[in-house]
Each structure stands twice: as structure tokens, then as C-alpha cells.
Image: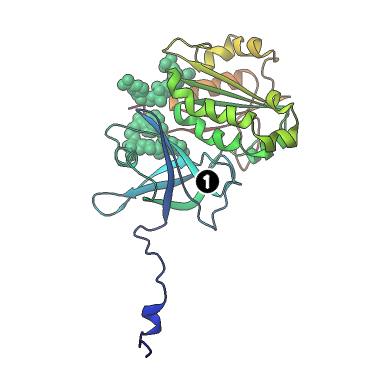
Amino acid sequence: MTLDIPVADAAPKPAQKTLPDAQTVTAVKHWTDSLFSFRVTRPASLRFRSGEFVMIGLLGDNGKPLLRAYSIASPNWDEELEFYSIKVPDGPLTSKLQHIQPGDEIILRPKPVGTLVLDALLPGKRLWFLATGTGIAPFASLMRDPETYERYEQVIMMHTCRTADELTYGRELVENLKNDPLLGEIYGEDFANRLIYYPTTTREESPRMGRITDNMTSGKVFADLGLPPISPETDRAMVCGSLAFNVDVKAVLEGFGLREGANSEPREFVVEKAFVGDGV
Ligand SMILES: Cc1cc2nc3c(=O)[nH]c(=O)nc-3n(C[C@H](O)[C@H](O)[C@H](O)COP(=O)(O)OP(=O)(O)OC[C@H]3O[C@@H](n4cnc5c(N)ncnc54)[C@H](O)[C@@H]3O)c2cc1C
Ligand SMILES: NC(=O)c1ccc[n+]([C@@H]2O[C@H](COP(=O)([O-])OP(=O)(O)OC[C@H]3O[C@@H](n4cnc5c(N)ncnc54)[C@H](OP(=O)(O)O)[C@@H]3O)[C@@H](O)[C@H]2O)c1
């Protein structure tokens, strides 16, 4: 006896995507009450330059996509995408996004853009990554991209948060990177000296303290690391933090003689906002 099943019904149905531009969450990690990171599947067609951002989100209560800009925290060779996020208590997106679980879907518009890309800087010897809060996200991507170390002899990651627990995501990332066998194989034991990590807190006692701007203008960071002060001949910088931080650090970098560049006009430093607004 043969079963008379129409071919269309017998064939397995492709999985239904319930959201436009849907990607599936593969992992979520909560770092503090106000910070978490998560990984999602990567669209096969998505190409991006490490340091760029995309629009991601969820469906809002009105059934329309509720999207926000997010820096991609994973490097461009990674088969998944990683994001590092704030939880704003009454934030339209993050009050919901903080509850995502593996298997859930988020919306990801596959159009990466941004100024924090290696192509926007002139060649140099040292590259400074200057971040506050979640502003470390684009540098989490760039620190894991071998091209960063092909272009620059030394990379210095300065990250400042109010409290020590807010530094943990970046600290673990740097530690894992320094012990990465692949990077060790490519760059030798010397790699640990090529990526320098300088975390500071401002409102809690910790081994290193102070604002990035203050530690640069006082010369403390250069003395601590045994490096010469920043100069336009050798040093390049990328900045990502609150508007107030960006404005102040830009003035400090200009004081050292560096000029702001862009994708269309590479110079000595580039800046991007970590968020829009004055603070929660
Ligand atoms: C280019 C760009 C890249 C960004 N990348 C990231 C990222 O990688 N990770 C991330 O968490 N956010 C990032 N943001 C901020 C993000 O777009 C949202 O603002 C954030 O997710 C909060 O969304 P919301 O709808 O909950 O609240 P919103 O209504 O968007 O924000 C409410 C208020 O919360 C504060 N706020 C928002 N985001 C932050 C933040 N990251 N840190 C501190 N205070 C904040 C601001 O005061 C803002 O006015 C980025 C923003 C821009 C412009
Ligand atoms: N209610 C709470 O307990 C609580 C806790 C954390 C955050 N928040 C809110 O969340 C918002 C975002 O917090 P956040 O900690 O991610 O960002 P933030 O307020 O921008 O602070 C992040 C780090 O950047 C430093 N910084 C701020 N402005 C600077 C400038 N102009 N130059 C150099 N360094 C600067 C801060 O130092 P300083 O400490 O010296 O300012 C801090 O170490 C804040 O506006 C805050 O209102 C609330």
C-alpha cells in the first residue's frame, strides 16, 4: 500500500522566521546588574570591519521594530556576532532586551557602519583605545582582530568605569586574548607586551584609579607604562564613550597635536559616541 501524500506536504518546511531580519540568540552572560553580553547567529552575507556598529532590536509593543545602534563586539572573523549591553532601567529596548535567552530571536539590520575602523587612521607605531563604560564594545572587536597587530606595534587599551565590577567584561577578554594560543603562535611570546591593558575606576578603590583624561594630562599613564607621551609622529587613537568624555578626550588628544580623522580622510584619531544622551 502506498500513502498518497502530496509532495509539498511531505517535504520538510523551512523554519519560520517570526521577525524581520531575525537572528537567533546563542548565549547570554550577565556581568553586573546593569551590564550583559550576548551572542547571536551571523547572517551569511554580513561583512563588516571590526569596530563598526549595526542596528539591532526587538518588536515593540506596537508590533513595529524597536531598534538601537550597537557596536559589534566580536571580530570580523568570528562566525557569530557578540554584543555588550547596558541595561537602562526604563529604556525602551534594554528593559526588554536584558531578558533574552538562548533560542530567542532578535532583529539585526545587516548594514554595518562607523568611524572606529583601522582604515580611518594613518599608519603609526602605537594605537590607543580610549573607552568608558560600554564604549569598550568596538575595541572588544578590534582587540581580537589580527589586522590591528599587523598595523601597529603596540595597542594600549585604556578603559574607565565607576566601579571595578564594571571592568570585568573587558578584563576577562584581555586575559583570554593574552593566553590565546593562535595569537601567541602568530606573534610569539612577545604578544603579551603588544597588547597593554590599563583599566581604571573613578568611584571605587582599585589598583589603578582616575579618569582617562586626567591620567593622560598628568602624564601618569605614560609613567606607569614606561611609554613616551603621545605624539602625532607615532601615536594613533580611537575614542568611544559618553558625549562629555568624547569632547574632553578629543581636546586632550588635540593638545598632543593629533587631528581627528574619518573614513574619507584618515588622520591621527577617530571618535564615536557610545550612546546618545547625557546618562541614565
Ligand atoms: C554608535 C552607537 C553605538 C552604540 N553601541 C552600544 C553598545 O555596543 N552597547 C550598548 O549598551 N549601547 C550602545 N549604544 C546605545 C544604544 O543604542 C541604546 O541607547 C541602548 O541600548 C539603550 O537603549 P534603550 O532603548 O533601552 O534606551 P535609550 O532610550 O536608547 O537610552 C536611554 C538613556 O540611557 C542612557 N544610555 C543609553 N545607552 C547607554 C550606554 N550604552 N551606556 C550608558 N548609558 C546609556 C542615555 O542617557 C540615554 O539617553 C550605542 C549608541 C550609538 C549611537
Ligand atoms: N544610579 C546608579 O547607581 C548608577 C550607576 C552607574 C551609572 N548610572 C547612570 O548611568 C549613566 C551611565 O553611566 P556610566 O558609568 O556607564 O557612564 P559615565 O557616567 O559616563 O561614567 C563612566 C566613566 O567615565 C568617566 N567619565 C565621565 N565623564 C567623563 C569625562 N568628561 N572625562 C573623562 N572621564 C569621564 C566617569 O568618571 P567619573 O566617575 O569621574 O564621572 C566613569 O569612570 C550615568 O550617567 C549614570 O547616571 C547610575
Measuring from the top left, give residue 23's x and y in whole percent. 43, 53
* Residue 248 seen from this side: yes
- Indicate the quadrant of ligand 1 in the picture: top left
| Pick the front one: 27 or 155 | 27
Residue at 53% in and 21% down: 249
Residue drawn at x 34%, y 27% as measured from the top left: 33
Of residues 167 and 251, which is closer to you in this image? 167
Can you identify the residue that label 1 sits on? 113
Looking at the picture, which amino acid does disc 1 mark? Val
Q: Is residue 205 left or right of residue 150?
A: left
At horizontal 64% and vertical 34% (from top left) the residue drawn is 180
Position of 210 with respect to 253 (left or right) is left
User: Residue 132 in the image: x percent, y percent?
Assistant: 48, 25
275 shown above or below 252: below
Counting other residues with Cα less than 10 Å from the Cα at mark 1, is it few (<14), some (14-19), or many (20 or more)? Answer: some
Query: What colouring style does the render use?
Result: rainbow
Vertical placement of residue 53 versus 108, above or below: above
